[in-house]
């Protein structure tokens, strides 16, 4: 009941306090909704259409309650309900994965209850962006591969291939990070793969990926691998972006632009807060109204507290030995920093210029 209660509460908070129309790149991606509504001939965007097609179904259904002057709130609600569906799919996959590692149901539901309010995940549920597809399907892919390695069930690889094709054709950065994550998690088990087991799944992966890619290209008229991006996105971070840390500004100026040259700084501030002012710090968000500063003795109470929580969270993950035992070892403790390394690579190569983060 705790998980269900926190899920309902977290969703209700998003519905009440946040307008998804204000989310990152909403009007850029809104062309997909216009396409599925029949208003334009092509979105002329580079992302995969699957996620936006699902969201458009929720929006079409919401038209049953459509009132012109409240269109923003109706669309916002439809987006958040669509994301909730993807989120629940991902949570179910996480539950199965954890249970397969013999973790108790009490601990699983407690973890998922906390996940309901985890800022990066909650933020992903509020905005219309395809990254949530990775959250929805990646746990199922990991679980399926675990079943294959542990129980030698070859047929489950077909299921894995179909889900992987959706991730690979959703967005370039999502595909890159997902592939990297799977490689890190299963690196030590690669030698256990039987090549004959991969023939059919690989064929299905290639065919389904090609069909989805062709469908995306046919509708978008732009390839996700090669397209002209807006000038504002054609920027590559310098190498120093990876290791530079503005220590004093983390305390005295934990705000946007003061840490534009620091991946570590942005991550520490954004993990439990809103560095880019897109969610609870957005000027139109109701989250910023009537705030009570509990730690008023700090210069920047919320930002300073979020920094402490971020550091504590990272240290806790690195020091937690419960996942390093043979029974629970499904995600290496070094995975979070490796994920950051993937993001840093993405920020420093031309591939990143073709994808908005």
Image (cartoon, grey):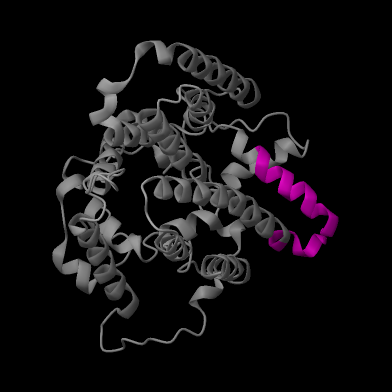
Residue 107 image position (x, y, % from top left): 39, 62
x 26%, y 82%: residue = 299
Q: Between 142 and 51, which is closer to the camera in this rendering?
A: 142
Image quarter where the C terminus lies is: top left
Classify residue 330 by image quadrant.
top left
Residue 350 image position (x, y, % from top left): 32, 29
Q: Between 161 and 281, which is closer to the camera in this rendering?
A: 161
Vertical placement of residue 146 versus 307, above or below: above
x 44%, y 61%: residue = 115
- Please indicate, yes or no, whether residue 90 appears anywhere in the rendered image: yes
Vertical placement of residue 171 versus 8, above or below: above
Classify residue 17 by image quadrant.
bottom right
x 48%, y 18%: residue = 201
Q: Between 168 and 192, which is closer to the camera in this rendering?
A: 192
Vertical placement of residue 202 versus 75, above or below: above
Q: How many labels does the image show?
A: 0
Which portion, as a residue range, is magenta? Answer: 53-73
Q: Residue furthest right?
A: 64
- Please indicate, yes or no, whether residue 32 appears anywhere in the rendered image: no
Classify residue 222 by image quadrant.
top right
Image quarter where the N terminus lies is: bottom right
Dominant SS type (magenta): helix
Q: Is 157 contained in the magenta span?
A: no
Residue 343 image position (x, y, % from top left): 30, 41
Residue 309 image position (x, y, % from top left): 28, 69
- Residue 206 vs residue 107: left or right? right
x 47%, y 68%: residue = 280
Q: Between 337 and 90, which is closer to the camera in this rendering?
A: 90
- Residue 176 vs residue 59: left or right? left
């Amino acid at each position: 009941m705790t998980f269900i209660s926190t899920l309902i509460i977290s969703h209700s908070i998003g519905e009440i306090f946040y307008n998804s129309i204000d989310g990152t790149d909403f009007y850029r991606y809104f062309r997909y909704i216009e396409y599925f509504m029949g208003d334009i001939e092509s979105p002329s965007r580079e992302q995969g259409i699957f996620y936006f097609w699902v969201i458009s179904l929720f929006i079409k259904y919401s038209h049953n309650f459509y009132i012109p002057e409240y269109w923003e709130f109706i669309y916002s609600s439809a987006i958040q309900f669509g994301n909730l569906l993807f989120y629940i799919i991902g949570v179910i996959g996480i539950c199965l994965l954890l249970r397969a590692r013999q973790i108790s149901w009490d601990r699983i539901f407690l973890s998922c209850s906390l996940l309901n309010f985890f800022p990066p995940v909650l933020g992903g549920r509020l905005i219309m962006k395809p990254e949530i597809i990775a959250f929805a399907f990646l746990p199922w892919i990991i679980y399926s591969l675990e079943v294959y390695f542990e129980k030698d069930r070859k047929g489950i690889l077909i299921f894995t291939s179909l889900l992987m094709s959706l991730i690979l054709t959703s967005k370039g950065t999502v595909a890159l990070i997902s592939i990297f994550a799977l490689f890190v998690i299963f690196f030590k088990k690669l030698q256990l793969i039987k090549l004959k087991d991969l023939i059919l799944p690989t064929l299905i992966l290639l065919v389904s990926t090609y069909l989805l890619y062709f469908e995306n290209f046919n509708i978008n008229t732009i390839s996700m691998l090669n397209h002209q991006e807006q000038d504002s996105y054609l920027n590559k971070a310098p190498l120093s972006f990876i290791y530079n840390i503005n220590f004093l500004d983390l305390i005295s100026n934990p705000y946007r632009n003061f840490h534009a040259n620091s991946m570590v700084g942005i991550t520490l501030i954004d993990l439990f807060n809103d560095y880019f002012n897109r969610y609870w710090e957005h000027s139109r968000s109701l989250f910023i109204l009537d705030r009570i500063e509990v730690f008023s003795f700090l210069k920047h109470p919320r930002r300073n507290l979020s920094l402490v929580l971020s550091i504590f969270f990272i240290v806790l993950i690195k020091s937690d030995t419960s996942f390093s035992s043979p029974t629970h070892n499904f995600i290496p403790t070094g995975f979070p920093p490796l994920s950051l390394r993937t993001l840093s690579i993405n920020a420093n190569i031309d591939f990143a210029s073709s994808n908005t983060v």
